[in-house]
Amino acid sequence: MKNILMILCVAAAFLSCSTHKQTDIYNLSPDDVFVLNESDIARETWLINNTIKGEWTYSGPSVDVSGKNVLAGLGKPLAKSKLKKKLKEAYKKMGLTKIKPQFAFDPDGTCTIQILGRKVKGTYNYNPDLEKITMKWHGVPVTAKLKRDGKKKLHLTFDADKLLSLISLVSSFSDSSTVKALGTLIDNYDDVLIGFELKK
C-alpha cells in the first residue's frame, strides 16, 4: 500500500511539474524569445564596423549608379570611364589629388575624415546589407553608398550635392567655379553617384 501511495505521489509531482513547464512555454511572449539587450546590439555593431576598420586613402574617383539611367543606354562601362576622367580633372582643380582625402573608421562607431588638409572627427552608422553609411559631424548627417571591393578597397559614393556639401563642411571649400562645373557635369546623368575609390 505504501509503495502504491509513493508511486501516486511521484506521478502527481511529475504531472504538476510537466504542466507547470508547459504553462511556462505557452506563456512565453515574443519579447522573451527575440529581445536583444544592449550588449548584444553593441557586439553586433562592433563586428559589422570591424569589416571596414582602418585608415583609407583616396586612390581615384569612383562612379556608381542608384537606378536606371542614361548610363545604361550609353554603354555603362564606357560612360563610367568618361565620367571618371572628368571627375579626375575636377578633383585635381579642387586639390584633392595633391592632398588626398583620408577616411578612418573605428569599430566603436567613430570616424575621422581629412579633406584638403582639414581634419574632423565624428560618428558613423554602417549597414552592409544596404551598402549604406551615414556619417555625422556636429549633428550634420551625410549619407553615402559604401561598397567593399576585397579587403583593401572601398568605393564611397554620394549624390553630387551631398559630396559637395561634405567637401565644403570639412574643408571650407568655396571655389564656386569648380562647384558649378562639377554640378553641370552630373546634371547630364540621372541617378549617378560620385565619390572616391579608397585603399588601405
Image: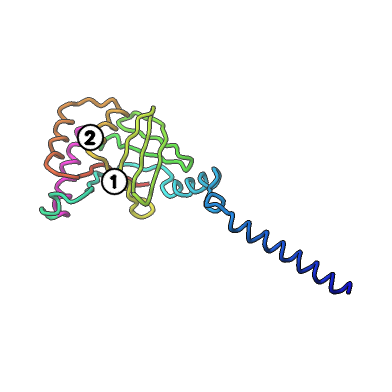
Q: Nearer the viewer, residue 24 or 113?
A: 24
Q: Quadrant of residue 173?
A: top left
Residue at image location 18% in from the left, 31% down from the top: 179
Left or right: residue 167 versus residue 188 is right
Residue at image location 17% in from the left, 26% down from the top: 176
Dot 1: few (<14), some (14–19), or many (≥20) neighbours within 10 Å? many
| Picture coordinates of residue 67, whole percent (x, y) | 21, 49
**Label 1, label 2: how far apart the Cα atoms are:** 18 Å
Q: Which residue is mark 2?
A: 161
| Picture coordinates of residue 185, whole percent (x, y) | 13, 39
Residue at image location 55% in from the left, 53% down from the top: 33
Give the image's coloring scheme: rainbow
Tell me the mark number nearer the camera, choosing from 1 and 2: 2
Q: Which residue is mark 1?
A: 197
Which stretch appears magenta?
A: 76-94
Q: Element type at marker 1?
A: strand
Find out whether residue 128 is within the magenta segment: no
Residue farthest to the front? 1
